[in-house]
Image: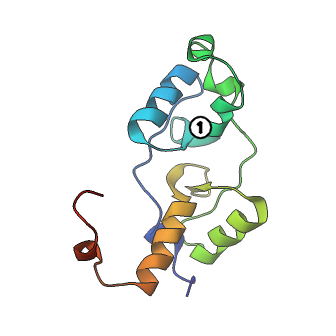
């Protein structure tokens, strides 16, 4: 059931930042795009990941970290997967390490996409409930 390739559920158009970007830049993206993980790339190469939790746990005001570089806070030791690995591999990493996002890269560590726990949940939901359920959801939700 989870033997399909990861590229079928990953998000290929990923919002990224460079190591020289600021935490203020990251905060703005988190708030406007409503995402929680931003891969950090140098050109196309994945060099880190910053999360909304990384900023929150600093315990600083928005003004205090406005000029801090993401390279000062980002995680550099990352779990990554390749696009042809099975969806089940992502589920295994999520469960074993309590991660919520895994960058998808090629053999040169170039970022190709990202897969999140939400992507996996959506995949499983659509397997169980393949019919469109929009007709049952009130317009005001």
* Residue 24 visible within the image: yes
Q: Examine the image and state in which quarter residue 50 appears.
A: top right
What quarter of the picture does the N terminus occupy? bottom right
> Which image quadrant: the C terminus?
bottom left
Vertical order, 3 against 34 (above or below): below
Query: As displayed, is residue 61 above or below residue 77?
Result: above
Residue density around tag 1, few if under 14, some if 14–19, many if 20 or more, within 10 Å: some
Closer to the camera in the image, 19 or 140:
140
Q: How many marks?
A: 1
- The percent position of residue 27, horizontal first and vertical second, equals 51, 28
Residue under the point 51% across and 32% down = 17
Q: Element at badge 1?
A: helix
* Residue at image point 44% right, 42% down: 34
| Residue shown at 53% from the left, 49% from the top | 111
Q: Position of residue 101 (x, y in %)?
A: 60, 54
Is 65 above or below relative to 116?
Answer: above
| Front in this rendered view, residue 45 or 114 | 114
Image-based side of 33 in relation to 60, left or right: left
Scheme of image coloration: rainbow
As drawn, is 112 to the left or to the right of 69?
left
> Which residue is at 60% across, 27% downward?
19
Can you tell which quarter of the image residue 32 is in? top left
Depth check: give the residue in front, 113 or 25: 25
User: Does residue 22 appear anywhere in the picture?
Assistant: no
Q: Which residue is mark 1?
A: 52
Find residue 46 and report its horizontal and vertical position in percent.
60, 43
């Amino acid at each position: 059931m989870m033997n399909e390739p990861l590229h079928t559920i990953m998000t290929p158009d990923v919002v990224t930042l460079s190591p020289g970007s600021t935490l203020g830049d990251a905060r703005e993206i988190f708030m406007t795009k409503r995402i929680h993980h931003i891969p950090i790339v140098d050109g196309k190469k994945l060099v880190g990941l910053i999360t909304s939790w990384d900023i929150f746990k600093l315990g600083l005001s928005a003004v205090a970290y406005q000029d801090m570089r993401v390279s000062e806070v980002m995680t550099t030791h990352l779990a990554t997967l390749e696009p042809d690995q099975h969806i089940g591999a992502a589920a295994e990493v999520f469960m074993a390490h309590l991660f919520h996002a895994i960058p998808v890269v090629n053999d040169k560590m170039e970022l190709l996409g990202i897969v999140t726990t939400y992507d996996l949940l959506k995949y499983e939901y659509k397997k169980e409930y393949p019919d469109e359920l929009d007709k049952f959801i009130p317009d005001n939700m």
